[in-house]
Every structure is written in C-alpha cells, then in structure tokens.
Image (cartoon, rainbow, N blue to C red):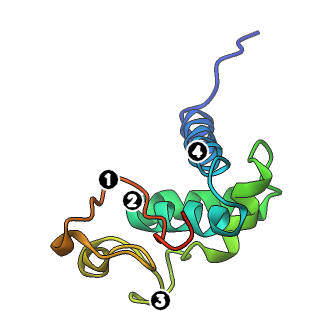
Amino acid sequence: MSHEKSPEQLVLDKLIRMANQIATFFLSQPENVRAEGVATHINKFWEPRMRRQLFEHLDRGGEGLLPLVIQASVLIRRPEAKVGSGVGVGEDASQGAPGGKGPSAGESLSEPSIPENLA
C-alpha cells in the first residue's frame, strides 16, 4: 500500500505550513495586531488561487491551521471579493498595510507592516 500523497494534498500541506509560519511570526507581536498582521501579509503576498485554497480548507474545518490563522481569516480578502476591499497585490499594495507608509515612503513590501504606535 502506498503512503504517497496526491499533488493536491501536497499543495494543501504546503499552504497550511506557510499560513502557520506567518501566524507563528505574528505570535511574537502585540496581541491587538496579530490577526490583522496575518491577514495583511496573506492579502498582500498570496495570489487569489492560494487564498481560494485556504478558504476551501477553512470551509472544510481548517484542520492543521493554528488558531491565529483561523481568527485572521475573517480579515483575509476572499478571492471573489471586489478589488479594493482590502490590502492586496497590485495597485493597492503600493499603499502598504493599514497604518503603513507604503513603498514610496521607504516601506518594504517584503516585510510585515506593524503600525508604529502599536509596535
């Protein structure tokens, strides 16, 4: 009997691992910015297909996801959401995270943005 996982399961496992890594990072941040930090990172850097897979997994119970990922999911923009309804990629990413300054003011898009008054 083979114990090999399907390609779909391997992708899902990686998605869960990535979401949990993001949540683990934000566990070191002040409690009042953790969920927003996870959601902002996923909205900015995950393409719609990845977010769709995350929501499909959440809709099936979210097995393996850390509680912070599940808590942040209400702030993550569903892929079918209207552009501009949250921080994402493309034009709205140039504005940076809520409370951020954006890359035009020297803010990196590769690092999470924590509002200075909360950090």
Q: Earlier in the sequence, mark 2 or mark 3?
A: 2
Helix, strand or loop status at disc 4: helix
Q: Which mark is residue 45?
A: 2
Q: Quadrant of residue 37?
A: bottom right
Callout 2 touching callout 3 (CB < 8 Å) = no
Name which residue type carries label 4.
Phe
* In-front residue for pair 79/101: 101
Residue drawn at x 41%, y 73% as measured from the top left? 97
| Earlier residue among tags 3 and 1 | 3
Where on the picture, by quarter, is residue 78? bottom right
Q: Secondary structure at mark 1?
A: loop
Residue bearing mark 4:
25
- Please give the residue where the numbered disc 1 appears in the rendered image: 110
- Across and down, in percent, residue 24 comes to 64, 43
The residue carrying mark 3 is 85
Report the residue that reaches farthest toward the left: 104
Q: Nearer the viewer, mark 4 or mark 3?
A: 4
Closer to us: mark 2 or mark 1?
A: 1
Disc 2 residue type (three-letter): Phe
- In this rendering, the answer to whether 107 lies above or below 10 is below
CA neighbours of label 4 inside 10 A, class few (<14), some (14 to 19), many (20+): few
Quarter that holds the C terminus = bottom right
Q: In the shown orientation, is residue 5 left or right of residue 14?
A: right
